[in-house]
Image (cartoon, helix red, strand yellow):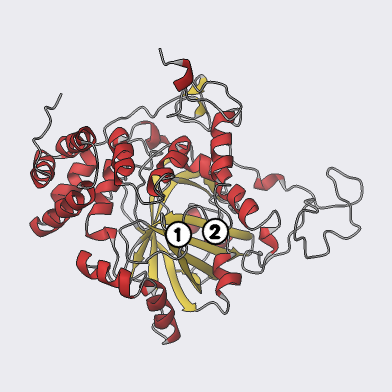
Amino acid sequence: MIEKNNRLTTGWGAPVGDNQNSQTAGQRGPTLIQDVHLLEKLAHFNRERVPERVVHAKGAGAHGYFEVTNGEIAKYTKADFLSEVGKRTPMFIRFSTVAGESGSSDTVRDPRGFAVKFYTEEGNYDLVGNNTPVFFIRDAIKFPDFIHTQKRDPKTHLKNPTAVWDFWSLSPESLHQVTILMSDRGIPATLRHQHGFGSHTFKWVNEKGEGVWVKYHFKTEQGIKNLDVNLAAKLAGENPDYHTEDLFNAIENGDFPAWKLCVQIMPLEDADTYKWDPFDVTKVWSQKDYPLIEVGRMVLDRNPENYFAEVEQATFSPGTLVPGIEPSPDKMLQGRLFAYSDAARYRVGANHQHLPINRPKVEVNNYQRDGQMRFDGNGGGSVYYEPNSFDGPKETPENKVTPYEVSGQAGEHSYSHDDHYTQAGDLYRLLSEDERTRLVNNIVGAMKPVEREDIKLRQIGHFYKADPEYGTHVAEGLGLSVPVQN
């Protein structure tokens, strides 16, 4: 029994029974709005910083276009902007680091945000991902705790490696992403020389109402380049805006960066039989099982005219969807559907979607009124409720979300698969000997400041389970023995 004065509680003092798993309708969700503990955590977390973003505070952005290159994609999705070869859609992208403040260095070891806003003829579509195909955690209920470990210690106001590795060592699902982060890919040479990923699984639906599961991959046409750790540290001191400057100068000089968008497509029925849970964002789908299919090409050809108006005030949410693209039961995605828009409402305001950078290219017709900074006509004297008898905007049943079957008991379910080691081990074994050496050296350097040996040993145990050589080399670098494996 936990002592009463040491129980985790909600903001109103009620004890929390499960802080690792959000409530879902059955094993695969979706997440239930009745999970007030989850909602409170996310809503409070979004309001912890004023006024910069809580995460992804340091960023750079650019305008461009997306052009479809594969006419076969329309058989998978009715999304209008993907309907025919040659169709161009204007877009805006924001690249960012995750953990640092708005004045932090571009060349730190950190995942890079990769957030794309497509201004389609059916409204905006936001694809909000990273430069990695996986993430550290797979349930949104753990996100505020994870980000707290990446931020500053409330006592010292310094970064806290002990907190970082304590959380990761107690969350073995993070091992795959930790391996990527600590590899050469953890510090891209520029924002142009990195891939981008939607990371989550999404659902595509065609005109017939037939669905498939899909994952997005943006493949850089500039090639992958990464920074040497010593050069990155040097640049962090001499030019902390190195990536921002590089992107701006490249576009200004007419050297327009481009990415090829590809997708992996999985039949709906495969989700029940695939060797990995396809909705677990800490796992990838093998490209041997689901090969990449080209969709189109993204080109960045115009810099912002005003950083604040176009980059800082840009808001993104994976819930900003268009007909033909829908969420999956991915628990991390389900939480983000709420949290990102809620963060934008707090940071920029309830009417953030009216700002020029966020405003759709198509007319907006709804019954949302008032709120801070409502700078248009606020609906004028038109009807302000629905349903109504005054010919106001009406719903379109053909755009209803396609149903899918859910089963099971409503409760706080974990994912059914807990193999956090195979894919991380496969990645380690794919690396060259030199790449493995740099990976281990980066991990050792990051773990040396950790204050407690038990935390180091627990994390080494995870590396060892992924690959014995992996764990052994980290242990040797830290001057420790590999812990006895179960």
Say whether residue 81 is left or right of residue 350.
left
In the image, residue 336 above or below residue 100: above
Q: Which mark is residue 101?
A: 1
Mark 2 surroundings within 10 Å by alpha-carbon count, few (fewer than 14), some (14 through 19), many (20 or more): some
In the image, residue 116 above or below residue 444: below
Say whether residue 28 is left or right of residue 276.
right
Say whether residue 194 is left or right of residue 114.
left
Query: Whole-percent x and y of residue 320?
Result: 59, 53
> Looking at the rendering, which quadrant does residue 12 occupy?
top right
Q: Between 476 and 355, which is closer to the camera in this rendering?
A: 476
Distance in Å between CA atoms under marks 1 and 2: 8 Å
User: Taking the image as drawn, is residue 234 in sight?
Assistant: yes
> Looking at the rendering, which quadrant does residue 403 occupy?
top right
Q: Which mark is residue 154?
A: none
Q: Are the residues tagged 1 and 2 within 8 Å (C-beta)?
A: yes
Which residue shows up at 45% across the image and 28% down it? 19
The tag earlier along the polypeptide, 1 or 2, is 2
Q: Between 276 and 126, which is closer to the camera in this rendering?
A: 126
Which residue shows up at 11% across the image and 55% down it? 437
Give the amino acid at mark 2. Glu
Q: Which residue is mark 2?
A: 52
Q: What SS does tag 2 mark?
A: loop
Query: Whole-percent x and y of residue 38?
Result: 54, 33
Query: Whole-percent x and y of residue 194?
Result: 33, 65
